[in-house]
Image (cartoon, grey):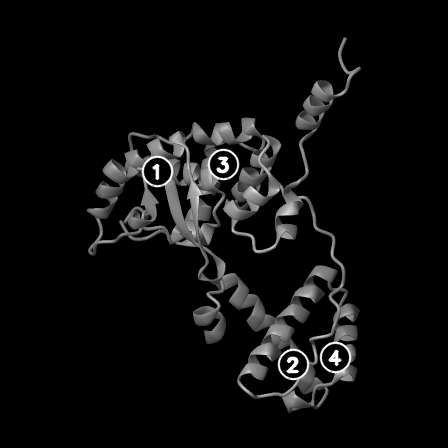
Amino acid sequence: MEYLQIEKNASPYTIKYYREDIETFFLFLQQEGIHDLSNIDQRIVRVYLTSLYNQQLSRRSVSRKISSLRSFYRFMERDSIVTTNPFINVSLPKTTKPIPGFLYKEEIEKLFDVSDETDPLGQRDQALLETLYATGIRVSECQQLTLINIDFSIGTILVSGKGRKERYIPFGSFAEKALQTYIQDGRQKLLNKAKANSDYIFLNSRGNPLTDRGIRLILKKMVEKAALTVHVHPHKLRHTFATHMLNEGADLRTVQELLGHENLSSTQVYTHVTKDHLRNIYLNSHPRARE
């Protein structure tokens, strides 16, 4: 767990699932009377996979557990605890990638109208929403932003993503205005309530850095104020950012770089298009779509 946190810079959720997957495997070994991790062979791996499928787990869950154990054994190989990785040649079950949920432009416009921008917390909420939608960053990346990460002179944010990989993301005039207003006014008022100074951009009502959970609660309250019937979480804003970018003509490679995806396949799930966009393309492209 320390290796994942310190060397791999894994998110708390990733560490949580790795721990659960490894502990589940340990429990299986205990039930099978196996007490030495170096004694695991292909036969035992097959028995374990059978036990997972017998629990009627989804292919996605089984795939994740195999990946966790493969990484676990790779770590043990590195530290010379074992000499072979019994999960290295186990093929992952094919999983279907669902189309990510996203907000239509009309829905997200309602969110932009709910905050009281004369109030410090309202300024913060507006800046938070504008930043998430303008950049498509993860909630963990947003929570870690500090003042030094923003360069207003060229309109970019420096983000530290998974595995400590850094990337620059541009932002537009709406996000710039919201951030400038909040940083120069509301943020300073919130910071005055804290006992210690902080360089983090997004603060809670007591002037302390916002947590991931705090950001999720803010979005939930904004949705309630906007009277939207959809569930909105930070990752849905990331989905929305990618979908709107591609629908407006951005190329896949650019969106991949902005999202910080290592593999293009992770970005390709966003290549779905809305019905309106599909209709507009048809009407503008087909020779006999219009008179």
In space, the residues marked 4 and 3 are separated at their CA atoms by: 46 Å
Mark sitting earlier along the chain (1/4):
4
Closest to the camera, between mark 4 and mark 2, is 4
Closest to the camera, between mark 1 and mark 2, is 1
Q: Position of residue 239 (x, y in %)?
A: 57, 42
Q: Nearer the viewer, residue 176 or 226?
A: 176
In space, the residues marked 3 and 1 are separated at their CA atoms by: 32 Å
Q: Is residue 227 left or right of residue 67?
A: left
Mark 1 crowd level (few <14, some 14–19, many ≥20, 10 Å Cα): few
Mark sitting earlier along the chain (3/2):
2
The residue beneath circle 3 is: 223
Mark sitting earlier along the chain (1/2):
2
Element class at badge 4: helix
In space, the residues marked 4 and 2 are separated at their CA atoms by: 14 Å
Q: Quadrant of residue 14?
A: bottom right
Residue at 76% of width from left, 59% of height from top?
Answer: 94
Element class at badge 1: loop
The circle on residue 45 is: 4
The residue beneath circle 2 is: 27
Residue at 65% of width from left, 81% of height from top?
Answer: 27
